[in-house]
Amino acid sequence: MAKRDCYEILEVSRTATEAEIKKAYRRMAMKYHPDRNPDNAGAEEHFKEAKEAYEILSDARKRAAYDQFGHAGVDPSGGGGRQQGGAGGFSDIFGDVFNDIFGQSGGGGRQSYRGADLRYHLDLTLEEAVAGTTQKIRIPVHVNCKTCDGSGAKKGTQPVTCTTCAGHGQVRMQQGFFSVQQACPHCHGTGQMIKEPCVDCHGEGQIQEHKTLSVKVPAGVDTGDRIRLSGEGEAGSGGAGPGDLYVEMQVQRHDVFTRDGSNLYCDVPISFVTATLGGEQEVPTLDGKASLKIPDGTQTGQQFRLRGKGIKSVRGGAIGDLMCRVIIETPVKLSKKQKELLQEFEETLQGSSHSKHSPKHSSWLDAVKKFFD
């Protein structure tokens, strides 16, 4: 019998976030937990189904494999699936729902936890983001202590079994009709106690170091784009693998250009003479200079497009355009002679021909007159 889609089981979209998936799983677990459905034979099956779906979608690697290959990508027979358990263990499963409140859930013995994922914000200039670059980054990470091989115990000694949980790492709590497991408060879920701590890591099993990584940034990235460096996150515990490092791009503000997707925008100041009579204006682009043709009678705020002078996105597609917005600059600090010439010019525009030369001003005056009338 074909298995149902994991997203369908948890009633979430394929773009759901980790928080949305966890919230949906909690809702399903509360709804179908056998203790709440003693007379519902199908509740146990729904509970198992929701648990399996959550195990796949809450693990970034399993989710990626599932999205690409479906259940075949996480099939245990192929080495990538979850471990199958017996029909019991509902309290262990239900413990995941209260993971954030009561601590880590799991079976007996020393627990293994995958290392935490890390995030690094990488600042880039617009030019670097457009052309691509290789950056060196230095990050602080926790790595397994070499002196004790991550055990946390003094060299030559070994951790001992926790007497509170008998090495299971869990203690059981009864809350109404729920039986919930929580991490042992003495060994913090490891199942073991350290009587003689390692002198270098002080019993933590890990120490903080800095490492330098080379990050290859592809051309066309934008703010918010992320690069995943697999296995470069925090070290895992109990022999589990490390987490991943996510390098998030932050493109700095540019003095000339503003980016919107694949297009670039810039303001181009021109004189009122050029705007009136027309001409050519030299404008900057990311790959050199270009000439922008200004038609006569250009108004401030008009935009002109230079095709293919924008950016080719990292996601592909056509190269964007450069949009140049014209800003007519009013001359300042004029001489007496210049002021007189402008006054004479203004007088030639007065009279019946004023609306011909200044149509926007004339239509604005008509609207104002209509408003007051």
Image (tube, rainbow, N blue to C red):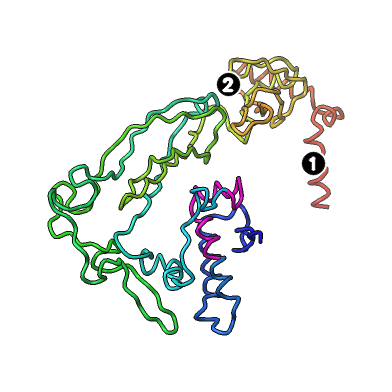
- Relative to residue 159, is residue 318 drawn left or right? right
Identified at 15% across, 50% down, the residue is 198
Identified at 30% across, 41% down, the residue is 140
Across and down, in percent, residue 177 comes to 44, 84
Q: Which element carries disc 2, helix, strand or loop?
A: loop
Looking at the rendering, the stretch of residues picked out in magenta corresponds to 50-72
Mark 1 residue type: Leu
Disc marking residue 244? none
The residue that label 1 is drawn on is: 365
Q: Quadrant of residue 324?
A: top right
Quarter the N terminus occupies = bottom right
Across and down, in percent, residue 142 comes to 29, 45
Identified at 40% across, 41% down, the residue is 231
Q: Nearer the viewer, residue 360 or 289?
A: 289
Name the residue furthest front: 77
Q: Nearer the viewer, residue 89 or 254?
A: 89
Please identify the dominant SS of the magenta region.
helix
Identified at 64% across, 15% down, the residue is 290
Mark 2 residue type: Leu
Residue 252 colored in magenta in the image:
no
The residue that label 2 is drawn on is: 286
Q: Quadrant of residue 244?
A: top left
Q: Is residue 17 above or below residue 355?
A: below
